[in-house]
Image: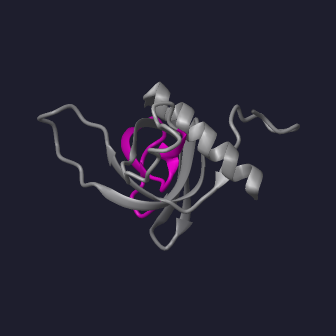
Amino acid sequence: MTNSGEKRKYVRLKANHLTRHIKFQIPGMDIYPTNNAESKDISAGGILFTSSHAYLVGDVVRMELHIPGWEKYAAQSSEEGRQESKLPVLVLAKVVRVEALGSGKFDIGVAFVGIDDGQQHALSKYITQHYLKT
């Protein structure tokens, strides 16, 4: 879905959700700390978040996206059995943008490069439903 004049493939929803991120690494290599951040906006193809940890463009990060209610849109959910399970959406993402904000904060834009098709579809439906409400 795109807006006229927009080059984005997916609709972006302004949202403040907890994200956990860590630089993706091969087991046995240096250990990077897990960082918490808050999202600024999200789409089915990526997320923009503010972090006190800077990445380099091209870095791959492992992310946990804590989005209450996203799983209600999963195909395997039945109408009666839909509940918030509080499970995060797990993704691998490539850093495509880093912007220094000052005070040790950075806006980090990432594109999802590894996400379960079912989770991506559920996330897309969640975003579309919430975008239409705004």
Which residue reaches farthest right? 4
Is residue 52 part of the magenta span, yes or no? yes
Residue found at the very far bottom of the displayed protein: 103
Q: Is residue 75 above or below residue 61?
A: above
Query: Residue 81 location in percent, x, y?
Result: 44, 44
Residue 14: where, in percent of width, then height? 65, 57
Q: Residue 20 location, x and y as percent? A: 36, 54
| Residue 44 in view in this figure | yes
- Toward the top, the furthest residue is 117
**Considering depth in this image, is 82 or 45 the residue closer to the camera?**
82
Q: Is residue 26 left or right of residue 122?
A: left
Query: Is 78 situated above or below 101?
Result: above
Residue ID at (41%, 64%): 52
Q: Which residue appears at 78% of the width and 35% of the height?
A: 2
> Is residue 17 one of those drawn in magenta?
no
Q: Is residue 98 visible?
A: no
At x 54%, y 60%, the residue is 100
Magenta span of residues:
51-73
Q: Which residue is painted at 53% across and 41% down in the image? A: 79
In the rendered image, residue 106, in percent from the top left (x then y), is placed at: 50, 60
Quarter of the figure that contains the N terminus: top right
Question: The C terminus is located in which quarter?
Answer: bottom right
On the rendered structure, is 11 left or right of 93? right
